[in-house]
Amino acid sequence: MTNSKRCRAFLKWAGGKYNLVEAIGQHLPAADLLIEPFVGAGSVFLNTDYPRYQLNDINADLINLYQLLQTAHQGFITDARDFFTPRTNQRDCYISLRQQFNLSVDPYERALLFLYLNRHGYNGLCRYNLSGKFNVPFGSYKKPYFPEAELHFFAEKAQRATFSCYSYQHLMQTAASDSVIYCDPPYVPLSKTASFTSYARQGFDLDDQAQLANLAEQAQQRGITVVISNHDTTWTRKIYQQAKLYSLQVGRSISQKGASRGKVAELFAVYQPKPIPKTQSVTVLRQKTG
């Protein structure tokens, strides 16, 4: 269930789904509500057409930014433009503003600086250390793009959305039967030497991966379609064995070295509600009429 014209997110985002929205949309049925427990940059939200959205992420800075755009986007966009100048595109200034962000407790200031750090930091990364401090290095880009049109589009569509900063467990367990869920969790490492994301202090380990699959099965039993994307590995195929699996090759930078960049197998696990057996539906009907 995707739009005819693809729309880009205003954030740079490692692992963003812009190039996969059409493939993902093929597995998302019509519904009253689309729930995203791991919304990230929001490419699926921006490129689908549901009446309502529940957009969630464990990253409080991200959700704070989205909520400000939803309620006060005109002033915010004007103020954000001041951070996209030749002066602010210097390493010393970046480090100073990164420190200011880490010390700030003001939601508006943090939102402005979060957008600045995202567009000026290295490779669209969003990473925090164990103390919760943002630590992405300077990106050294010639002229970082100020995504004004994308910010306005997001703010307009955000009027259909509710933003939250809950755990994925809460979203999965409380989803109603008239909803569809799309999950884009931190991906399983492709090798033993690859590390999990430091996207949030809580992390996301193999136990979380397995628990998400279990919660998807439970939602499926309640009549909800759940789609999960991840790397296509032996282990992900094992934990998603109750789903229909679809694999495709995706061009992705899997290394900082150009020679190591290439195709990576992407897996979609689709949990579709199972039809009620005829004998069971007859019993339910008799109970209602009796």
Image (cartoon, helix red, strand yellow):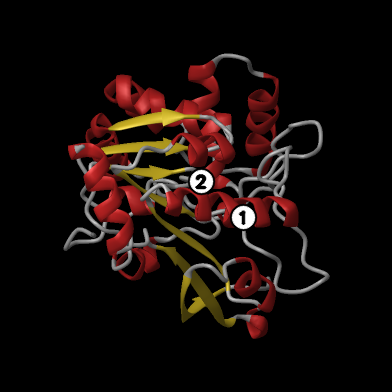
- Disc 2 is placed on an element classified as loop
Question: How far is mark 1 from mark 2, CA to CA?
Answer: 9 Å
Q: Is residue 101 above or below residue 259?
A: above
Quadrant hosting residue 237? bottom right
Q: Earlier in the sequence, mark 1 or mark 2?
A: 2
Q: Is residue 73 above or below residue 276?
A: above
Q: Residue furthest top?
A: 106
Residue type, mark 1 in image = Pro
Where is residue 81 drawn, in percent x and y?
A: 38, 32
The circle on residue 3 is none
Where is residue 48 drawn, in percent x and y?
A: 25, 53
Quadrant hosting residue 256? bottom right
Q: Choose between 79 and 173: the one closer to the eye.
A: 173
* Quarter in which the N terminus is drawn: bottom left
Image point 73% across, 37% down: which residue? 201
Residue contact at pointers 1 and 2, CB within 8 angstroms = yes
Image point 30% across, 61% down: which residue? 279
Q: Which residue is mark 1?
A: 186
Task: Answer with left or right where residue 192 lies relative to residue 238.
Answer: right
Viewer can see residue 47: no
Dot 1 crowding, Cα within 10 Å, few <14, some 14–19, many 20+: many
Where is residue 142 drawn, in percent x and y?
A: 51, 56
Q: Is residue 119 above or below residue 24?
A: above
The image shows a total of numbered marks equal to 2
Residue type, mark 2 in image = Phe
- Disc 1 is placed on an element classified as loop
Q: Which residue is mark 2?
A: 38
Task: Answer with left or right where residue 33 lies relative to residue 63.
Answer: left
Where is residue 271 drawn, in percent x and y?
A: 43, 62
